[in-house]
Amino acid sequence: MKTDKRRAPAGAAVLRDDITTAIRRSVMQELAQVGYGRLSIEAVARRAGVSKTAIYRRWRSKLELVLDMVSAAAGRKLPLLDTGSLHGDVEVLLLVASGALSHPLASQIIPDLLAEAARNPQIAETLEKATRDYQARVGEIVIGRAVARGELPAGADPWAAADLIVGPIYWRLAISRSPLDTPQLSRMATAVVAALRVACAGSAEQDQEVWDARTLTESEPHRAGA
């Protein structure tokens, strides 16, 4: 019986997953401790217990390493559980987001990378894409469910709604850096849902007004010389 033993091409480096994981973990720890400006490949390698060569086999530069880390972190999908109501969905989302933003590493890394984004267009672009993808998912799932249940009008803008959901929790934890307990999160969810109902109702009314005006214009006979 033949056993198919495939070997890596001669001269090719075998990239071990455990080493890649150790490097990524070390990048997070170094970023939290010293920030992007003082981050060095040497320090990351020392913390991970690997050689600089092991890092350069995977990433060509400090910037590429950090961008990959940001993209990987953004790709981890936060659970958006279906609780059966808009308030419940928003409350769970805020609870999960609160836990993520309150993590000791995230609370140090996010403000630093946002400051660095003002100077580095590649970091800015990566962060913008991560934010945009997350907002799209929140809008599509949470707002989509609410529309399907009849809790929000069909004309609800998912992007604006996602801003109203994510904005308050991000401001509180990442900007003002004030902790939130469970009762405060529940009250925030109540306020967010009330704002969503007002904002989405207004958006739906504006859409209807535009539609009515367009229909009226198209149905009126054109007067000569007008």
Image (spheres, rainbow, N blue to C red):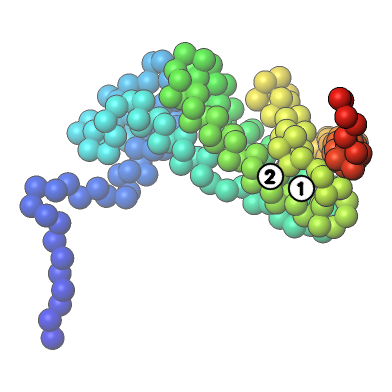
| Quarter placement of the C terminus | top right
Q: Residue at x 11, y 54 (%)?
A: 9
- Which residue in the rendered view is the most extreme toward the left? 10
Residue 148 as seen in the image, left or right of residue 108: right
What is the count of numbered marks? 2
x then y, percent, for residue 73 = 50, 40
Residue 182 as seen in the image, left or right of residue 8: right
x then y, percent, for residue 59 = 29, 34
* Among numbered discs 2 and 1, the one appearing first in the sequence: 2
Residue 143: image tag: 1
Residue 127: image tag: none
x then y, percent, for residue 201 = 90, 40
Foreground residue, 73 or 22? 73
Foreground residue, 192 or 46? 192
Q: Residue at x 45, y 20 (%)?
A: 121
The vertical placement of 71 against 144, above or below, is above
The vertical placement of 114 against 219, above or below, is above
The vertical placement of 4 against 68, above or below, is below
Q: Which residue is mark 2?
A: 138
Q: Amino acid at mark 2?
A: Val
Q: Can residue 198 be spotted in the picture?
A: yes
Q: Residue at x 32, y 50 (%)?
A: 17
Q: Residue at x 76, y 47 (%)?
A: 143
| Quarter placement of the N terminus | bottom left
Q: Amino acid at mark 1?
A: Ile
- Which residue in the rendered view is the most extreme toward the front? 224
